Structure formats: C-alpha cells, structure tokens
Image (cartoon, rainbow, N blue to C red):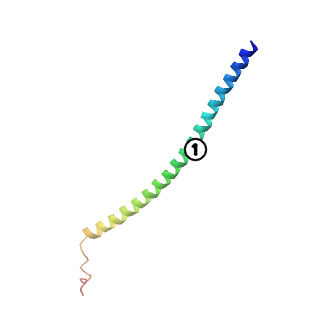
Amino acid sequence: MDRIKSEGNRDLIKRIDVLETHIVHQSTIIDELNDVSIKQWLEIEKLNDRFNHLRNIFSELERDIESPPDKALPPPHY
C-alpha cells in the first residue's frame, strides 16, 4: 500500500513539474510578446507623427498651388 502511495506521489510530482515548466515557458513567451508589442507601438507612434508632419506639408503645398499669385509681386524673371 505504501508503495502505491509512493508511486502516486512520484507521478503527481512529475505532473506538477511538467505544469510548472509549461507555466515558466508561457510566462517567458508572454514577456517577450509584451516587449515586441511595446516596440511596435513606439514605432507606430513615430510613423504617425511623420505621417501627420508630411500631411501638413502637403496641405500647405496644395494651398500654395491653389491660391492665385500675388499681383503686387513682380514676375520671377524681373
């Protein structure tokens, strides 16, 4: 009877060890994914800033193209 309990305890300990190993592995993966997610978010913010800056530049250029030239200024060949 004690032998059966001892084998049962060893089996239970092995199962717990396997579960603990899986948990450690999953925790490591979650930490790595979190790091990647943070880096990607920072890159997205930078790209959004650059995009907005370029959009503003193009908006100004479009306004300049669409507005009629100032008649008070002489033509560029003078």
In the foreground, 43 or 9: 9
In the foreground, 21 or 38: 21
The image shows a total of numbered marks equal to 1
Say above or below: 52 vs 11: below
Q: Quadrant of the N terminus?
A: top right
Q: In this rendering, would 27 be left or right of 65?
A: right
Say above or below: 13 vs 43: above
Q: Give coordinates of residue 34: x percent, y percent.
A: 54, 45
Name which residue lies at 51% across and 52% down.
39
Quarter of the image where one finds residue 59: bottom left
Q: In this rendering, would 74 be left or right of 28?
A: left
Name which residue lies at 40% across and 60% down.
52
Q: Give coordinates of residue 33: x percent, y percent.
A: 53, 44
Name which residue lies at 67% across and 23% down.
12
The extreme bottom residue here reads 78
Q: Give coordinates of residue 32: x percent, y percent.
A: 56, 45
Say above or below: 16 vs 65: above
Dot 1: within a 10 Å radius of its alpha carbon, few (fewer than 14), some, or many (20 or more) residues? few
The extreme top residue here reads 1
Residue at image mark 1: 31
SS at mark 1 in the image: helix
Name which residue lies at 65% across and 28% down.
16
Say above or below: 45 vs 29: below
Q: Give coordinates of residue 30: x percent, y percent.
A: 56, 41
Quarter of the image where one finds residue 25: top right
Query: Type of residue at label 1?
Result: Asp
Q: Quadrant of the C terminus?
A: bottom left
